[in-house]
Image (cartoon, rainbow, N blue to C red):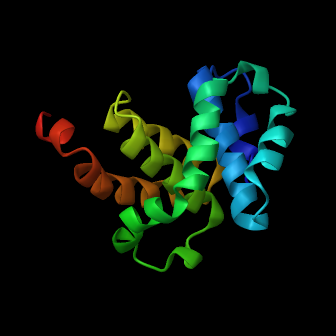
Amino acid sequence: MNTQSQHANPNKSRSPRHRAREFALQGIYQWLLNNEDSGVIDAHIRQAHGFDKADREHFDALLHGAIKQSIALRAEFANLLDRGIAEVSPIEHAVLLIGAYELKNHLEIPYRVVINEAVELSKSFGGQDGHKYVNGVLDKLAPRLRPLEIKGN
């Protein structure tokens, strides 16, 4: 994972929920690469520096929810990809799982916030243009998962 951007501005204030997304991203990335048990990953991440500043409840929902629902979530966005899921970088794959999970399961979070947060994660940890890819996929997915919210805007 590219952590350069994360450390480029250590004084940048990040909300507890954003921190939860960052830690969930790390866990899902680890799960994608090693297929480790989510409980083992969870325990490891809770020991990480700065975890005490994260929204633990949201972290739990994202990490465990995205992993449990990964097959259904991938099915939601698979036909929006320009390549097979195996060809998507693990960072963008993990961010798409988080974004799709939040769009589907956390209706209290506005869809624009979900997409913006996913883009920010991709900018911080992903490849050079990964954020554009994530933005494009989630922008097409949002009307499917949030038709009433988008219609109202």
Direction from residue 30 to residue 56 in the image, left or right: left
Q: Position of residue 89 (x, y in %)?
A: 61, 68
Q: Position of residue 116 (x, y in %)?
A: 42, 39
Direction from residue 132 to residue 58 in the image, left or right: right
Residue shown at 56% from the left, 46% from the top? 65
The answer to whether residue 128 is visible is: no
Direction from residue 85 to residue 150 in the image, left or right: left
Q: Which quadrant of the view contains residue 103?
A: top left
Q: Which quadrant of the view contains residue 148?
A: top left
Which quarter of the figure is the N terminus placed in?
Answer: bottom right
The answer to whether residue 32 is visible is: yes
Residue shown at 28% from the left, 58% from the top? 140
Q: Position of residue 29 (x, y in %)?
A: 69, 56
Residue shown at 76% from the left, 36% from the top? 7
Q: Is residue 101 above or below residue 85?
A: above
Q: Position of residue 54 (x, y in %)?
A: 68, 24
Residue shown at 75% from the left, 66% from the top? 33
Q: Which quadrant of the view contains residue 13?
A: top right
Which quarter of the figure is the C terminus placed in?
Answer: top left
Q: Is residue 96 above or below residue 153?
A: below
Q: Nearer the viewer, residue 148 or 17?
A: 148
